[in-house]
Image (spheres, rainbow, N blue to C red):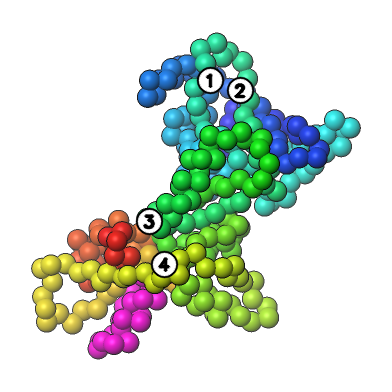
Amino acid sequence: MGLWQQSVVKCADNCGIFKAVIIGMPKWHHSRGRVGYAFRMAVRDKSREYRGEKLPRGIIVRTKQPIKRKDGSTIKFDENAFIAISNNKPLGNKVKGPVTYECGHSDNLVRFGGVPEHFNAPFQRLLKRQAKEDPAAEGPQLAWRTYPGGSGAMLNAVISKEVDCACVLTESAVAHIIKNSGEDAKERVEILGTYVASPLVWGVHALASRPADSDSNIFGISRMGSGSHIMAQVDNDNAEGDLRFKVVNSLDGAVESMAKGEIDYFMWEVFTT
């Protein structure tokens, strides 16, 4: 996991709270007027590495070490077991030894995925409130993971068990369910409920300098099966010409591809763009 050394012990058999004792080098820390020794660590997940002050609150890390009970028995985690380490905060000016972090067991942890857009603000407020609470408090804990790639990326994350659930476009979820409706389908997902009842407003974006008589019709999309992909197909039902796609991964990728002339249009949620 990119850590110098780690051991995990269970605090109590009857609760889902674990304590991770991470041994490393404390380092003098100064941030927003708070000074003290902080523990610099590196936690690696599948796609990126966080170091020191960049370590986000509630990051998900995998533990491969079996947990030893007081009676000598052990608890082994399967490949889907996770713990959440609190953020890298100042620990006072007398810290010289091992640093202890409270961790929530996977039974209490809900791993949720979403796009970095305005309608997910309630989740961010919950994370801020959760950060101020006692990490050993009872009840579920939210761990958030951002997916700029949209619904297609989030559906893949649910299938690969990176997250437990995600807030995706209804159209994308329905299209995926229909595509994987066979009895032997291994990539099934389930719609648990509705988060936003009103429809999204989609903006169709093109370069201001694009010739009005151009017959090129290349749409930039975040992923196959994403909202930008499905809505481009819906829009094309009312237009003439062959439709082609180029995967651009994110909104930044769409802007870059359009500037290079690789795509003619892209569709995105209008308030975000």
Q: CA distance from mark 1 to mark 3?
A: 33 Å
Question: Of the residues shown, which amino acid type is indicated by label 3?
Answer: Glu
Residue ID for mark 1: 91
Quadrant of the snapshot with the C terminus:
bottom left
Which mark sits nearer the N-terminus, 4 or 2? 2
Give me the residue at 47% from left, 62% from top.
153
Residue 147 in view of the camera: no
Residue ID for mark 4: 223
**Disc 4 on helix, strand or loop?**
loop
x, y (%) of residue 59?
A: 54, 41
Question: Of the residues shown, which amino acid type is indicated by label 1?
Answer: Leu
Which mark sits nearer the N-terminus, 1 or 3? 1
Are circles 4 and 1 on residues that touch, CB within 8 Å? no
x, y (%) of residue 151?
A: 45, 65
Magenta-colored stretch includes residue 240? yes
Are circles 2 and 1 on residues that touch, CB within 8 Å? yes
Residues 169 and 186: in front is 169
Q: Is residue 129 above or below residue 255?
A: above
Residue ID for mark 2: 99
Residue ID for mark 3: 117
Are circles 4 and 2 on residues that touch, CB within 8 Å? no
- Left or right for 135, reference 118: right
Crowd around label 3: few <14 · some 14–19 · many ≥20 (10 Å): few
Q: Which residues are magenta?
A: 226-245
Q: CA distance from mark 2 to mark 3?
A: 35 Å
- Left or right for 272, reference 62: left
Question: Of the residues shown, which amino acid type is indicated by label 4?
Answer: Arg
Give me the residue at 59% from left, 64% from top.
159
Q: CA distance from mark 2 to mark 1?
A: 8 Å
Q: Nearer the viewer, mark 4 or mark 2?
A: 2
